[in-house]
Amino acid sequence: MHPQEIDIPFDPIITLIVFLIGVPALVFQSMSPDVRRIFFERRRLFAFLFGLIVFPVLSALVVSGIGIYTEINSNPSAGASAAEHAVRWIIVLSTLVVVILIVAIYFPLRYGRRQGVLRLLEREILWNLWLKGRLPEEAVEDIIDLGKNAESPQEKSMVLQTIHNLVLRTCKHRSYTGDNLETLILNLHEIVIVDSQPANLENFRMTAEILQAIAVARKEIQHVADLQRTVKAVSGLGCAALMKFEFGLEIDNVIMSFIQTLSLINYIKPLDVIKNQHIHVMTDVSEALFEIGSLAAEKQRDFITVAALDKLVTILCQTPMTKELPPHILNELSADVMGLMAHIWSEGDSQKEFVRRRMPDVQECLGLSISRILGKACFHYAENSQFATANKLAQMAKDLKLKRKPLNN
Amino acid sequence: MKTKVLWVEDSARLELRNLTGPIYISGEYDMNLAEDATSAVRYLRTKEYDAVILDMRLPPGMDDYWINVYRERGENMAEARLGMELANWLFSGKSDHSFPPPEWIKPYHVGVFTVENDSKLHASLEDMNIKVFEQKVAGLPDTILIDIINKIKAQNPKYSEKVRGSK
């Protein structure tokens, strides 16, 4: 090569830079549609990603520019040798290759997967939480969408772990009043119950943990709104778990976790301005325990049924029977206990014997005769169009009348 | 009033029916079950228990603090001994957990039910004044939990005074 000729290897430089631009484009192409949608819809995320693409391209241009500049300004009279020329371009081209390698490995790993966008969304939500004390609903919906569209249970677990962190941070935040998690609580089930996918036990277990974390976030809370939503969500998911999974030790344990969450709510003291708000939540809790317990009885999951009844009786007996307690609340609580007892009763003789043993506790707590409690419960269910339970109560009353003696013995 | 019990045990799912069955059937206990360190902290902060039964080998659960402790100790339940770490959080003040331990709990509320049985474990429990210990071995009766609960209650001044009063 003649030293006075300017010999710049444009071909490899342009090829490498085009490839560098192509890597993020390929990553974008390979993203699942829901992840790509989140990037395109969220300007801040898109700008962040754009910056991440532009930065390596700019560095490649700068490095190439420096190479070209040095080549042009090299003094041929100073005797620049072919070796010097070769070394210069080896340095420039290998720098470009290194940049490409970093981008090609880092970019797909970091942002090509669901985890990448999840991390970016989490950062955005935490920033908002720190700034305003609230979770931005749009970002929360996006996280729920990521979970809903995740194909593998492992990906769903990642989303649920992120949600758990967000819940803990929100509940710890000084501005958390007990009413900031509506979107999250109401949509959480969408992640674990997707018609086109088989339900995953671990995902259910994590959801149970999240709901429990919300339910017992603070011993004293200002409002019961999140608590009430959590109770509904726990009830729905508990029943869904019973429907979706066949009998098994693992699933019983997850359902027990839902039941325990409900029973723990009895120990939360909301400071709601509206009087007796807590008691109103307890009727929701009692209803939820009844729903799970009666479905478990129907499916002959005896352990779950017994645990649900035990918790119901505990809640009923712990309710202070004061003058301020609205009568309809006591009716609801006692109806749920008796309703569940009737469901258990209808399942067989051993179950009948178990119910007989637990009845005196209820009688003692309410200070009423069993026939009166049964009558009220029957009326309650008939009034609420829950005729199946009303019928089972009527049958139990009938059976007890026939066998009144053994009960009194 | 029912006796409030918390059983912290990771393999409880395997023994759920035979060990907790008698508890639920009796109707005398208000029982909660925590399967990992995260849930155990949550329960302990929410409710005052008359008896807390601790396993030594626990998974971390979902809390970052416990996950990090678990990772630092080689991600092995036997090595990590998160149950002991939980007891440390409760009584020795050695834990860096962001939540302070609940004030109501005293060593006499706690019993240990675990497969481990070495001198180091006993020394640590003794340091914390935890006296009820039961090793988990094959062939234990189904009422073992009730037995442990009774032992814990027997050392609780609230219950021993009642017993003395009734005598």
Image (spheres, rainbow, N blue to C red):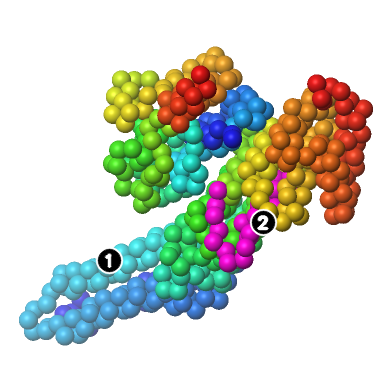
- Local secondary structure at mark 1: helix
Q: Label 2: few (<14), some or many (≥20) within 10 Å?
A: few
Question: What residue do we see at 25% from left, 71% from top?
Answer: A92
B24 within the magenta span = no
Q: What secondary structure predominates along the stretch shown in magenta?
A: helix
Q: Residue at the spot x=45%, y=38% of the render?
A: B59
Which residue is tagged 2? A324
Tell me: B161 left or right of A332.
left
Three-letter code for the amino acid on which mark 2 is drawn = Glu
| SS at badge 2 | loop
Q: Amino acid at mark 1?
A: Ser
Whichever of labels 2 and 1 marks the residue nearer the N terminus, that label is: 1
Q: Count neighbours of disc 1 (C-alpha within 10 A) and say few if under 14, some if 14 to 19, many if 20 or more.
A: few
Is residue B16 shown left or right of residue A45? right
**Residue toward you, B78 or A101:** B78
What segment is highlighted magenta in the picture?
A: A267-291
Select label 2 or label 1 by which is in front. Answer: 2
Residue A256 sits in which quadrant?
A: top right
**Residue A94 shows which numbered tag?**
1
